[in-house]
Each structure stands twice: as C-alpha cells, then as structure tokens.
Image (spheres, coloured by chain):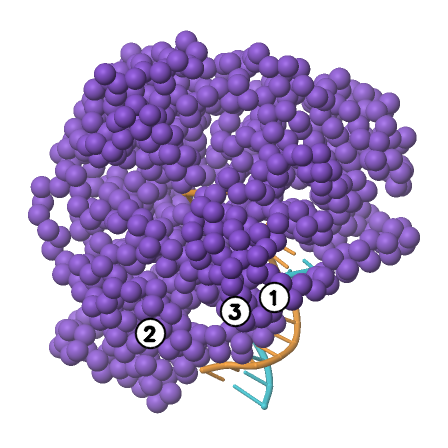
Chain colours: A purple, B orange, C cyan
Amino acid sequence: MTSREYLDPLNSPQLRAVQHRDGPLLILAGAGSGKTRVITNRIAHLILSGAADPDRIVAVTFTNRAAGEMRERVAEILSRADQSDEAGAPVLSTFHSLGARLLRWHADRVGRTRQFTILDQDDQLALVKEVAQRHGREADHAERKRLRRYVERMKNRAFDPEEAFEQTRNEREEDDARFYETYQAHARRTNVVDFGDLLLLPLKMFREDPDLADRYSHRWQYVMVDEFQDTNPAQYELLEHLTHRHRNLAVVGDDDQSIYRWRDATVANILDFEDDFEETEVVKLEQNYRSTELILDAANDVIEHNTERRPKRLWTEKDRGPKITLFTGRDDREEAAYVADEIEALGRNGADWSDLAIFYRTNAQGRQFEEQLRGLGIPYRVVGGTSFYNRAEIKDVLAYLQVAMNPSDDVSALRVVGTPKRGVGDVTVDKLRNATRIHGIDSAFDAMRVVAGLTERAGVALDRIDPSPRDDGQLEALAAIEDLGGRPKGGIAEFTELIIDLRERIAQEDDLSELVAQLVDRINYFDHLDSKDPERADDRKDNVQELLVALRDFEQGGEIPIDDESPVDQEGPHPEQDLLVGSTAGRQLRGFLERTSLVQDTDDEPSAETVTLMTVHSAKGLEFDTVFLVGMEDELFPNIRDEGDQAELNEERRLAYVAITRTERKLYITNARRRRIWGQTRRTAPSRFLLDIDESRIEHDPKSCTDDINYGRTRRQRGWGSGGGSSDWSSASSTQSSDHDPMSQVDPNADDHDFVDPDWSDQELKPSVEANDSPPDEGSHDWVGKTVSHSRFGIGKVEEVSGDGDDARLTIEFVQSGRKTVVRKYVKIL
DNA sequence: TGACCTGACGTTTTT
DNA sequence: CGTCAGGTCA
C-alpha cells in the first residue's frame, strides 16, 4: 500500500481541504498558511487514494514559477510514495499556458493555424497602430495605448467585439468597439493572438461548441486554482466551462492579497464563490507558519484599515521576533547605500544571500540598489523588469524566426524586413502594409513575394490577385508596390528569399540553434548593431549570444515537446498543411517561441545564492527570512494618482500587506526624505501605511537622517518631524488619520523641485558619477578556476576562457546545469 | 532612404 | 533623466 505519511504534517483544516474529494471547495488561505502545501498534497492525495489518474487533474496558477514549484513538489511526494510517473502527469500550468495549449489544439476553430504567433505588449501596440491606420483614424502614441488597453480590458472581461458593442452608450464607445472588431479581424487574418486571446479564444471555442467543453470537463476530472482572488471574468468563465460536468473545482485564495484589480481581476470571484457554486465546502486556513508574531501584527495593523474585507486574523505559534527596523535616508541614494551596507553586514554574520530580499513598488527603484550592491560585490538577481526577451536585438532575431514559422504575421515581417538596412525604409514598409488591402494578398509577406516575383515558387499564383471588385485604395496600393524602386525591391527580394530558405532549412534540418546562428551571421546582424549604436553594440551582441545559448539549452534540455494533439480530440488531423508542422526543428522552434512569449526569463532559479530584488507584485507567493521594504513614502507607496479612489487605495494597502507578510523573521522598512524622480529631486513624506503600524513594533535606526532640511511646511502636516529619533513618531502618527496631506499631492506650483541646498547637491553628484565609472574588471586570464554564478545556470567553476574583455566566452562547469559556454558579462565572481 | 535632431512623455504593478 | 516617436535634411 502507498505510504500516507505526507498527510502527517498537516493541521486539521489543511487535512480537511486535502481530503475533500468531490464538489466545489473554497479554501480561504491567509498569507503563509501553507496553501501551496495544501494544493500539492491534495493533488498527490487524489492520485494516491485512487480518486483520479494524474492526467485527469488540472491545477492552474498565475505564474510559471508557481506552476514549476508545484510540479516539483507533487513529483516529490509521489516519488516518496513510490508512485512516480505512472499514468502520465497532472496538468500544471498558468492560465495563459493552458489557453495557449487549447488554442494550439483547436486553432482552426478560431481561424488560426497551429503556428500562430503570440504577441507581447509591444507587438500589440504595433498591431494597434496598423489597425488604426486601416481603420482610418489617426492614433497618436497615447491613443494607441488607450486602444490597446481597451481591447485588453474587453478580453479580460470576456467580451468579444459583438458583446463589447452591446455595452456601448455613446458614439465614442461605439467607435472603440468597432476598432476592437477590426483589430480582431486583423489578428485573425495574420494568424496572431495577444495575451487576452489566450483566454478569450478558448472561451469562444467552448461557447460555440459546448460539447467540446464537455469533453474537456469529462477528461479533466479535478480542477484546482491557486491565487483565485486574482482571477478575471474570462478566467472565471473558462473554469466554469472546464468544470461544468463534474463541479470538482477547488479554489485557493485570500481576498487580502488581491493585487491585480488593474488587470481586471475581480475579488467578487472569491467573495461570491459560495453563491455561485452551491454546496461549496469552505475551509479557512488561519494559522501562519511563516512569520513571527510581530510581523503578523504589523501586517494586520496595515490591512485592518481596509474598508472591504472578510474579517480575519492570522495567528502563529512562533516567537514574537525582532522589531521592525526603520531607516530614513537623506535621499534615495543614501537609502540604497544603507540597505547595501546592512546586507553586507548580515552576510558577514553568516546570512545566506538567498535569505535576503529587497522589495520596491516600481521597477525603476531597483537600479539604485543594484548599483550599491554591485559596488560592494554582493551577488544579486533582479526579478522582472525589462525582460531579456523584450530587448530590441532579441525581438529582432525572434521576429525572423516568427516570420519563418508564421509568414502571415505582419507585425514581425514588417518589423524586420528593413532591419538590418537593406534599402527598405519606412515608406516601403508603409506600401507593403497597404498592399494587404489588395484582394488576394493576405499578408505583408504575400505582398513581398509579389514584389519579389516569387509568387510561383511560394505557391501563391498571381492570378489569385483578383482584379474585379477593386476600390481606389486597392488600386493605389497595388500601384505603390508595382512602382517600387530598384533598391527597395532588391531588399524585399533578398528578405523574402531569406525567409523562404530559412523555412526550408527548418523543415529539413535538426540543428535549430545552428540554423539560427547562421541566420544571425547571414544577415550581418552584428555589423548592424555596430553601426546603429557602437556604444552598446557589445552588450547587444552578448545578448544575442545569450539567446543562442538559451536556444541550445532548450534543445538539449529535453523540454517537454509541444503536445500537438488534444487529449479529447476526435477531429482528426488539422486541415492545414504547413512545411514546418512535422519537422523536429519546427516543433522545437514552436516550443521555444511559445516559451519566450509566455515565460519571463526570470521565473526560474530561486535557489541561486543571490540577494533578490523585485517589485512587491513579483514577490507574491514567496518568502524570505529578511526583507527590506524600501521606498515607503506617500505617493510612491501607496502609488496613487487619484486621491479619492478608495478602491485603488485599498489595493495599495493589500499590496503593502503582501509585502510585509513575505517576511519570516526580520523586516526593514526604509524610505528617503528626498527622491530623484524624472531627473528632478523631490521632497517626500512617509507612507501612510507606515504610520498605520503601531510604534511599539518599530525601532528607528540611529543612522537615519535627522537633519531638518527646510521642512517648515511639512512639519505642520504629516511629515518627518523635526528632531529625528522616535520622539516625534507618535505625534506624526497621531495626526495622520484624517487629513489628506497636501504634501503628498503633486503640485506644480509648489517649490518642491527647486529645493536650494548647494552643499548637498554638490556632494550628491560626486558619488553617482563615480558609480557610473564602472571599476575596471580583472583581466580575463585569471578567471579560470574561479567560482562564479549565473542567473540561469546557478553556481559553477570556470574551466576555460576564450577571447577577452567583456566579450570573452567562459566555459563553465555548473553544479546543477552541467557544462555551458556563456558570455563573460553574464556571470559574477563569488 | 537613413542619419540626425528635437520634443514629449513617462513609472505603477504582469501573464 | 532616458527613451522613443516623429520630423527635418542631406
């Protein structure tokens, strides 16, 4: 019989949740109450108790990191119970990956092929631009962003264009809905989907064919959802379809940790769950296993000010724990320097770097801390922020691959037809874009083939271009591409042949990364980088090299090959016949491209021996022994634009709650009296959330700035006080409750920005200049033998060096990932 | 066409 | 302050 010792460490509500079998289950899990343990154990229990085969269980999360972690933990429990990989594995995935899979399986139902492209936010903006032009409305940058957001919002709310139109109440809204319709039509025609489509289109499939939903519901017997408080209406409806048949839906969440309202998450989903699903069993997990009592008290101080919440109070058996240390710096640089110093001291006293984390409200704050940590030689990793895959050079190379995979993808094709320079500029690109209006030309790439005279070879006969019902616009567009000059024409021909050749190679050859390396070489991409921006060319080349490493890694890593067939599909093979569907390299490329668009490069490797820097949003679901919560100033955290928006303020408060409850033992809270923002130094005021925390839980670091830097006006309001130290803390705290502090408003007439203090500004400039002059690195020759860390591969030892300078390649034997060659600048000496 | 300049704008937060 | 879209000119 199988061992059930995995049930032993569970407390009684946890046990109840794990052993619950059929019917809806709502688990209200406070921060640190062991919800991941409950989900993973429940999955394991369903399998081990014989309730369901592994592959009939689905668990959905919001981040790839969470999905990966669960996968690991479930596998661990199963292997300990001697039941490893029999009968397949459970589906553990994010909502968006699951959506992508469903789409892949049934692409033809929503007018796509399996090779569809997934657009990121930038691509979406490009698409909006294109559609706006076609839609006959001029849209400037701000308007494009608004439209993009509008489309996204409609999709998150599960409205297709028709439903969006029904909602409209005035002409402007009608216009937006019409735009949405055009956008969708264009996306369909070019075989692309955006993030919202990954939810909306599967929904559309299920709405149109309830039988299909039924088959999935039959197949996936048990469905679980993590972070349920962050689901949006589209996700909710998707769950309804998937569980319609059996209603075995178990959701886990905490309304106090709902922080994605701006992404159209609906807290009502969790608050009203019991009403929506009759006979729901409700389990409350209120014992916290993560934090000391003092931390929980502080978190509660903050969250209890919220106006809408289910009352609850977490408790712990842990010690009271150390007080929160509060530090106030003179400015943001000093704040960062303090944190770095403190971290170094903790390290000297034996703390593991991986026990330490810095949380900030906005990504932009991270840079200061990076600089200071780098200055002290402390290894760190930044989670989130500008993703590797968002860099222009990476997107360029990927766009080539995307076009090869999906030639209908106009966004990618038009992005790179003129990059590197081959005589195709904006004017020509516009002509090509317009040409897609011509009857018989379905995509920009089609138009290019026509221009290049390659229509026969590409299988598109010229006579497909139907000359009959043609309006002036079409005639004009056709004339425009026919009259192209020799240089643009040549460039287009070159590009077209390149792509066609690339497709043929992918169809025939196995070695994808070699192909891509050849591609980069063939288009002289490095020369392009050199000429475009010599300053940063080396960086960018390194990034491209890293991409090649990542691709090779993907090939060799034995990643799960994309499963092309639906587990419930009775529909036979897809009607499409694409060159790349069957080939190994094509399959791998599809998998790689999907991963690059769905997985942030920073999702993995939490075990690396580094200090972690991230936004509070990214921190959700994680825990650290010691946390530095920085930038706790009004205006910054809470980050509010509309002082009157209570819902927004509540969400900020929940965010602060999330941040505090990540802490296991020791919390530092820091802020600065002056902060540089948009190149200007501004005075600040302490965060109202900070003032909510009972003073008895706080100790002021004596190193804090106590100068009275001309705070005459502030002192009367909520402010820093004049003498420093803790004496005026309570007075500041007692005045905070009722007022809306004018200091926290951005007031263009206030003299905040011309703060005059020549001594200080001189001093401030110097160190930051020095920090920019990065100290010369050691010569490459003595890297051999050094122990280094790499953000993805972890710790390793350098075995070989080739080349020198930042460009050097190091061959490193990594402890976890084996032998890899990486670019030098990506590793840090430990 | 493409190099170069200029001015506007931006920072929430992410799949 | 930094980026980037859009405009100007060779």
Q: What residue does disc 1 label?
A: A780
Whether callout 3 and callout 2 share a subunit is answered: yes
Answer with left or right where residue A689 lies relative to residue A574: right
Q: Residue at x 88, y 41 (%)?
A: A709
Give the number of the disc on residue A432: 2
The residues bearing labels 3 and 1 have C-alpha atoms spaced at a distance of 9 Å
Q: Nearer the viewer, residue A791 or A643?
A: A791
Is A799 left, or right, of A470 in this rendering? Answer: right
| Mark sitting earlier along the chain (1/2) | 2
Q: Residues within 10 Å of mark 2 (few under 14, many from 20)?
A: many
**Amino acid type, label 1:** Ser
Q: Secondary structure at mark 1?
A: helix
Would residue A305 be seen by someone viewing this image from the given angle? no
Q: Which amino acid is tagged 3?
A: Ser
Q: Earlier in the sequence, mark 3 or mark 1?
A: 1
The first of marks 3 and 2 along the sequence is 2
